[in-house]
Image: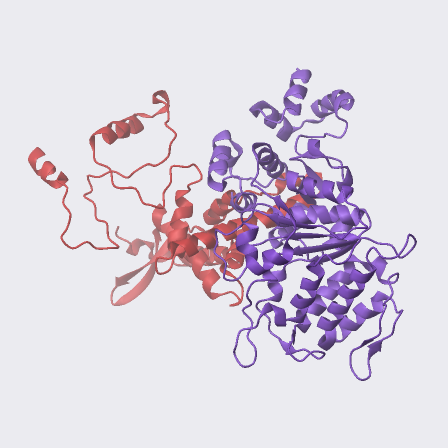
Amino acid sequence: MNLHKLASRLRPTVTQKFRHFHIQGSGQQLEAVVGETSSAEPSLLSVFRTSEQDPACHSERHTGQYYTIPPAHIQKLFPHGLPPRFQLQVKTFNEGCVMVRPPALELISYLKRVDYSKPPLRYILYGDTGSGKTLSLCHALHYCYTQGWLILHIPDAHLWVKNCKELLPSSSRPSRFDQPIQASQWLKNFKITNERFLSKIKTTQRYVWTKRESTEEGRPLGELVDQGVNRMKSSSDVVGAVLRELRLQAGGATDGEGAFKLAVAVDGVNALWGKTTLKKEDKTMCEPEELTLIHNLRKMMKNDWSGGAILTALSQTGSLFKPRSAYLPNELLGEEGFDNMEPFVPVSVPNYSEKEFESCYLYYLDRNWLQHPHSRSEEGKKELIFLSNKNPSILERLCAFL
Amino acid sequence: MAASVRYLLKPWTPSLCFVRWSRYNPYYLDPDPSKDAVPESELSPEQKELQELKTVRPIKAALSSDTSSPFNDPLMSKFINMMMEDGNKILARGIMTQTLETIKRRQVEKYHKSPAAKREEVECNPYAIFHQALENCKPIIGLASVQKGGKFYQVPVPLTDNRRRFLAMKWLITECRDNKHRRTHMYEKLSQELLAAFANEGNVVKRKQDLHKMAEANRAYAHYRWW
């Protein structure tokens, strides 16, 4: 009897009996089966979870399974990176679990094999709204973090081109505009993520902020970042300086303390080449080119440096003046954006497959999230598949009130 | 007799169509959109009679808000209709789903943070909480204003089921609309009230208890009721 249960467990399609077993999970039965699984798959405690916590070791056999990101990593790496609904989920379930999916695995495999002395490759994650692009990006970033890279994560570039309360004319250049609040907020989060690099990297040039303030050559990057956080007025220029320093030094230094790899992660990259909703003082529309932050970020997207990778994801949700049905890189980036980003490696992010949906369903059952008695039956599951079309975000919103 | 009934049954559409009134001949039966068919043997004699009647009599048109899915809850639909303003059902339904989500999040968080011994006591099902909270808010006895000898007396009076349900829902909604801080969202206010009512605390349950006390105090006037 136990062997039958073991066999049905290792098969991806789950039978009613197994699910019943899994939910009840009485002590003695679990121990007995674990004793038998120890020879087969020691890491599989259940079908939808894996105990493999290191993203570098994730492979195709982990597809559809959830792995837990340690809370310390979430605090450090994602002070601003995770989607808001996912943050709520992490708070509710008391754990941050991400599903291992083929697009993220593809990205990580590319990152493992690339030669880092050449210019960086640009990867674009594209897919339908709510199909999991941002979370795949976060999974790849977690891999980079565990490998000790320096993470430059812009959680949503759309936030820099709309709803800006303070738009100051730039202190350094006459035709540019600064966004002090956004820049200082980003610098604070950057500091939290990359604490250990801040004292090791040194500036290569003297930066003058005002008549009395300047940062000398050879000072640690931490000082530059503090300058931006404390002095809001020059924070956008500080961001530009930080980006420039990192670009120059990414692969440059020889092995030793200074060597680090740079991961540039931008979500909503189509904001850089779209339109803004910000107005100048004479009520004309602002171009993205005229914003300091966007201008510096565009320079980062060019592959004239070496020693890292550029991971990006498109996003229609926060985009301006783009139709709801647009999801391809051509449509969302526009002509200018496409020409700038070319050549890039496109990675498609589809909706859940059968196995992944099954896994998500079991995860919600396990976390006591699906409460309605009908949603726990076979009929209810078919209804959920029909209503959500296996789209991850729609499924999440449906299960939230069921 | 049969002829007059048949005349009543003739499909008659008024020349002026009132948007908010759908007045059916009482001969028409209510629709039952659920899919499950209870087998013949389990029905009581009255229910068997009802089944017979359904094959003969005409049935009213189903509302567009009712589905055949078991996720459809008539009590929930009633509450959403009461919360709706200006016919904006989408907004009212959205508020209700957000309320259910908030309740569930709070309870599931509590569930995951509590030790294994206390987990059984935490109720996570938002539908169960909603039903129980509504039950806790329903008054058992009400007051009616009766005129006797030139004066009006508040007389304790029994309430029908529909009236009790209506009062409970009305009190919940007005409590959330009026007595809370104006900058909080409706779904937050509702979820707080529902969770409090589930635990038999909060302003709505207090209002029900005040009504009971008034009815108890006016017990002497009970004889003024003639119905």
Q: Image check: B146 left or right of A277?
A: left
x and y, in percent, of residue A327 in the image: 53, 50
Please give the letter of the chain rendered in red: B
> In the rendered image, which quarter is residue A110 located in?
top right
x and y, in percent, of residue B104 in the image: 57, 47
Q: Is residue A273 above or below residue A53?
A: below
Q: Image check: A59 left or right of A128?
A: right
Q: In the rendered view of the protein, which quadrant contains the N terminus of chain A?
A: top right
Which residue is the extreme one toward the top?
A1
Task: State how many labels appear.
Answer: 0
Q: Is residue A372 above or below residue A156?
A: above
Q: Nearer the viewer, residue A270 or A59?
A: A270
> In the rendered image, which quarter is residue A197 located in?
bottom right
Q: Is residue A24 above or below residue A146?
A: above
What is the drawing colour of chain A? purple
Q: Image check: A119 left or right of A82?
A: right
x and y, in percent, of residue A90 in the image: 66, 48
